[in-house]
Amino acid sequence: MMKKTRYTNVYQDSKGNFFYQVFLGRDEHGKQKFKKGRKDTKGNPFSSARSAYIEAVKIKNNYLESSGKVIYRMTYKTFMLKKYIPKYKGDVEESTFLSHSKAFDYAINRLGDKLLEDITVLDCEEYRTWLLTESGFSKSYCSMVYISFRQSLEYAVSVGILDVNVSRKTKSIPKGKAVVAYWNKKQFEKVISQFYIDDYHEYFCFMMIWLYFMTGVRVGEALALKWSDIDLKNAKVRIHHTLEYKNKQNYTIKPYTKTASGKRVISLDSDTVSFLRKWKKVQKEHGVRNFVISYDDTPTSRSAVNKIVKRYAKLAGVPEIEAKGLRHSHVSYLINEFNADVLTVSRRLGHSGPDITLKHYSHLWNRNDDSLAELMTGNIKVKFSRKRQASFNGNQVFKVNK
């Protein structure tokens, strides 16, 4: 037999012991669910009705919070797992979500147990300091992680859970200048000299690196290329897709590029057209008819591209670069060999405007004024007057001892 106490959900049994019994909703069959307990978190029996009540409130709040039924007294961890992360996942590409998911983990590990409303400017500042001093991350990665944290609190404000985003009172973390390694023409020639194209797989590796270097397309754009995108007769390639890759059986060809302006048609040089014609025939002999950068008619992963680039860089004795470094290599090649102007480069790369191109590649034009300096030499005809034409007064008059 049990009797009620003056505290909600707290009872006393026939022996005088206190316990709580909390209603936790219904299961999928409509059956009521209760949580009953006689001991506190330390395993000790409740010494009073009040101590049992405190534990009952905690149990009830944890249930409401985890089920998303309480939005104000919510920990940062619950907010992230129940509110922000699902919303963010629905807003962005899967590849973007996966690249940012670790950033969410870092913030949760540091601030997860705090109630959203209890997070202070000092908490944010300490998290920022930890990123910059103890995390071991690069400055650009720290910047991305901290931006993700600030955006999560901004979302809490936008949906009315918080009144103010306290992280905005701290400084952002500047990205710093990222330098992407690339190959110049001579280094690229050393790399391609390592290929034995009578071997099918080496021919595949050669075509991959050659196509990236000679077109400047993004990694995912080239991996999505099919032969139907290439017009060998008119020497054009149509860049309208990008690859989202998980494994050889699980991939998606997205009907768009990284940006809206990324959809473009670019011209191919005759050497590339010639290599592509031969490669297409070789592929057919091995049953490959769809994907251009493929040896088994399934897409190639981004990680495989990076491994191949690094492997042949090592063989050639040139700097190891990332796959995206071949895009930089292409820009360097266009500028240094052909003095290409920024507008042409911008259109070829699929940028929305020359300003974007200059933002990322302006350093590659640093020798572009050499020819101008040569042209300027002797261009101005200099002929001095045989007598003084101007008269000077006051302090501007200089006395010269003859």
Image (cartoon, rainbow, N blue to C red):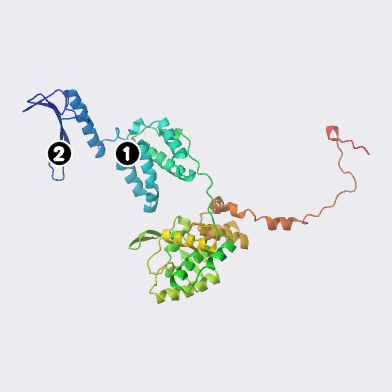
Corner quadrant of residue 73? top left
Q: Position of residue 311 (x, y in %)?
A: 48, 62
Mark 2 and mark 1: Cα distance apart in space: 25 Å
Q: Amino acid at mark 2?
A: Lys
Q: Quadrant of the C terminus?
A: top right
Q: Position of residue 264 (x, y in %)?
A: 48, 62
Q: To which quarter of the image does residue 146 belong?
A: top left
Instruction: Look at mark 1 in the image and give the residue it sits on.
Output: 77
- How many numbered markers are drawn? 2
Q: Is residue 17 above or below residue 307?
A: above
Q: Answer above or below: position of 381 versus 174.
A: below
Say which element carries label 1. Answer: helix
**Relative to residue 124, is residue 337 depicted above or below?**
below
In this view, the residue in front, 28 or 186, is: 186
What secondary structure is marked by label 2?
A: strand
Q: Which mark is residue 33?
A: 2
